[in-house]
Amino acid sequence: MKTEFATPAGAKHARMLGVGAYRPRRVVDNAEICRHIDSSDEWIRARTGIVTRRWAAPDETLGAMAEQAASKAIAAAGITPADITCVIAATFTHLMQTPAVATEIAHRIGADGAAGFDISAGCAGFVHGLVLASDSVRARGGHVLVVGVERMSDILDLTDRSTAFIFGDGAGAVVVGPSDTPGIGPAVWGADGSQADAIRQSVPWDTLRTDPGHPFPALRQDGQRVFRWAVYEMSKVAVQALDAAGVAPGELDAFIPHQANERIIDSMTRSMGLPDTVTVAKDIVTSGNTSGASIPLAMDAVLASGAAVSGDTALLLGYGAGLSYAALVATLP
Ligand SMILES: CC(C)(COP(=O)(O)OP(=O)(O)OC[C@H]1O[C@@H](n2cnc3c(N)ncnc32)[C@H](O)[C@@H]1OP(=O)(O)O)[C@@H](O)C(=O)NCCC(=O)NCCS
């Protein structure tokens, strides 16, 4: 038997080359949310920072939103769809068990032939995808499209006081490709499966078969438990990612965490000792928590506003259902 054979040859380094976003047309304010739950605009703003979020219309499917975001990211990267070798979709609101939405996205953008698969890591999904993309480019070359895309409104129980006001829809995408210089630092990632029930689907899909009258499965969370875990544990993960990259808090240009709650973001910023010179993404105010889409949407927003520029050094931190997390330092596209 032949025991020696060719192995893939990749790039020395990988980096994000372009980013793109799609925000659904419909803006939903807190007053509309409060038609279904006993709450108020003041309470929602004070406890989460959220003023508005976007909810997708029927034609704004996962594939359609991802196509828009991805096409912008590909144009910004200065490549063509044919250059994309793999599409990774981070989502947990694709309501088809199979096939993955990633192959549909590849087809929609004109990257037929590219590999495609979905990953499910809740709100940490996008950074998980970025880790895989970076490792893939360094192992085998090519250009990997990572799309975070969610229709959270499809799995919301509008009468649930602990989730209805938090979540929004949208898509964000980046192209990861070869680079002469390091652009994506070492990932600190992991999970705490003992807290798997802290953010979860209310019942499995097959409940609808055994109990056809059961309400459609919806997202549930233990808000206080998630809040505490995020504030105490995720700040440590953020510091570990900085240490792993050899970057001091004061050397960062931007902090782009998952947009779960403005109070969590502020608490992390304080406990990490980030100076005022660091731009902190606050897309949550107008987007809510868009789960897997939140980090690329927030990245696109800070770049579009001019608060950060291409080439800046940013800390990305995703965390959520699992409970899972992933953090890394990266050069902004
Ligand atoms: C959901 C969340 C905003 C709730 O805020 P909180 O401060 O923890 O709220 P609590 O559940 O402790 O309730 C505090 C009070 O607000 C009330 N309250 C709860 N939900 C409310 C709502 N939607 N509107 C108005 N009042 C509400 C409670 O009844 C309670 O009132 P009381 O003090 O009179 O008993 C917060 O826990 C959170 O953001 N958690 C993290 C969620 C998250 O980020 N999830 C995604 C992770 S990927």
Image: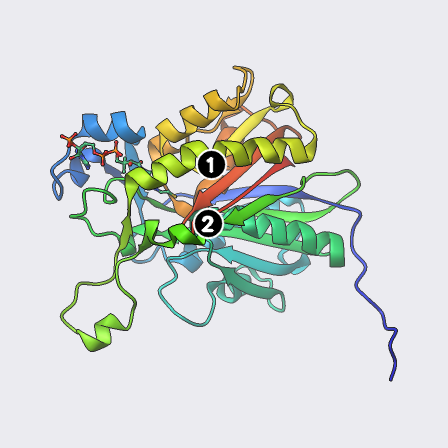
Q: Nearer the viewer, residue 216 or 306?
A: 216
Please name the residue shown 33% across and 57% down the image.
59
Q: Nearer the viewer, residue 262 or 230?
A: 230
Q: How many marks?
A: 2
Q: Quadrant of ligand 1?
A: top left
Identify which amino acid the numbered label 2 is placed on: Asp
Please name the residue shown 67% across and 39% down the image.
185
Mark-to-mark CA distance, 1 and 2: 11 Å
- Coordinates of residue 210 in the picture (x, y in percent): 20, 77
Q: Circle 2 sits in a helix, a strand or a loop, which is it? A: loop
Please name the residue shown 60% across and 22% down the image.
249
Residue lying at the far bottom of the rendered structure: 1
Identify which amino acid the numbered label 1 is placed on: Glu
| Quarter of the image with the C terminus in it | top right
The residue that disc 2 covers is: 192
- In the image, 251: left or right of 163? right
Q: Are marks 1 and 2 in contact (CB under 8 Å)?
A: yes
| Quarter of the image with the N terminus in it | bottom right
Please name the residue shown 25% across and 52% down the image.
156
Q: Nearer the viewer, residue 305 or 263?
A: 263
The residue that disc 1 covers is: 233
Res 279 label: none
